[in-house]
């Protein structure tokens, strides 16, 4: 039997009505029936198994069991800080990064970005992309898509690496890769300006090259996330 994953505001044992997009999708698109199995998650790390108790108009009533521990989050904590990208490229980064286990996205505005802002509507759409990717990939935590900041205003907690075609340090030799918290910073389609990477390096970010091949602006952050997160898997 198919198990439907649904996001709810609060996970707790008992009866809960699911309305909004999630309830509509179950009731009107999937046309679930009482007894259908579900897993409800709150996007903050908790989930609970349960079942559909009743289909009610454009929503459903769920009967949830006690929340259970979730073992799908990676041991390492990665924040991706990609430059603003054209079209749906940033949405692709958010979708695939979420699937890999990224915990937060901090978009940056670089000098050579073709896109000059992240509007509230676009940010809200990216957050929905993250939520849907978390649901589909079995995560109970939905990463936050933060407001875009200028390169000089980007902050990180422990260690950071910045992808730079002009760097001499290979990815595998970057300091901080052996820790459990990392911020990965990647540039726009037009690349970084030299003063941007110099400023990031002066603040402690390690400039690294990713290999002999040139990766697209939407490929680099996903490749770096995969390399670091999967290397930390048991």
Image (spheres, rainbow, N blue to C red):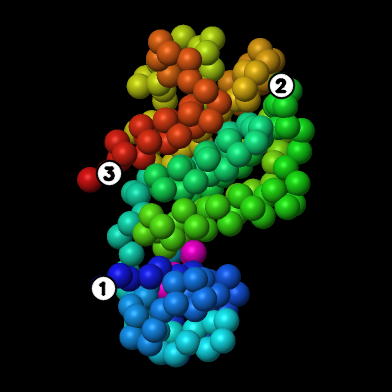
Against 150, is 190 above or below? above
Against 75, is 56 above or below? below
Alpha carbons under labels 1 and 3: distance apart:
29 Å
Image disc number at residue 39? none
Residue picked out by circle 1: 1
- Mark 2 and mark 1 lie on one chain; the one further toward the N terminus is 1
Graded by Cα atoms within 10 Å as few (under 14), some (14 to 19) or many (20 or more), the crowding at tag 2 reads: some
Residue picked out by circle 3: 233
In the image, is 52 to the left or to the right of 112?
Answer: left
- Position of residue 162 measured from the top left corner of the image (x, y, whole percent): 53, 25
Query: Does the magenta stretch mainly form a helix, a strand or a loop?
Result: loop
In the image, is 130 to the left or to the right of 12?
Answer: right
Q: Residue at x 34, y 80 (%)?
A: 36
Residue picked out by circle 2: 112
Q: Residue at x 46, y 48 (%)?
A: 98
- Position of residue 143 measured from the top left corner of the image (x, y, whole percent): 52, 53
**Callout 2: helix, strand or loop?**
loop
**Callout 3: helix, strand or loop?**
loop
Against 215, is 135 above or below? below
Magenta segment: 40-44
């Amino acid at each position: 039997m198919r198990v439907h994953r649904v996001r709810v505001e609060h996970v707790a044992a008992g009866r809960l009505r699911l309305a909004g997009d999630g309830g509509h999708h179950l009731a009107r698109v999937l046309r679930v029936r009482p007894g259908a199995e579900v897993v409800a998650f709150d996007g903050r790390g908790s989930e609970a198994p349960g079942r559909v108790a009743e289909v009610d108009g454009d929503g459903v009533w769920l009967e949830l069991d006690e929340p259970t521990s979730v073992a799908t989050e990676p041991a390492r904590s990665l924040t991706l800080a990609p430059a603003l990208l054209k079209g749906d490229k940033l949405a692709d980064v958010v979708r695939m990064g979420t699937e890999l286990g990224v915990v937060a996205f901090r978009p940056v505005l670089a000098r050579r970005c073709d896109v000059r802002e992240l509007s509230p509507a676009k940010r809200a759409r990216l957050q929905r992309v993250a939520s849907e990717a978390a649901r589909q990939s079995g995560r109970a935590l939905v990463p936050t898509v933060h407001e875009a900041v200028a390169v000089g205003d980007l902050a990180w907690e422990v260690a950071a690496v910045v992808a730079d075609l002009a760097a001499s340090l290979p990815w595998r030799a970057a300091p901080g890769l052996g820790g459990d918290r990392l911020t990965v910073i990647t540039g726009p389609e037009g690349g970084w300006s030299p003063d941007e990477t110099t400023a990031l390096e002066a603040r402690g970010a390690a400039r690294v090259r990713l290999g002999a091949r040139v990766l697209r602006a939407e490929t680099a952050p996903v490749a770096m996330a995969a390399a670091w997160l999967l290397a930390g898997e048991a």
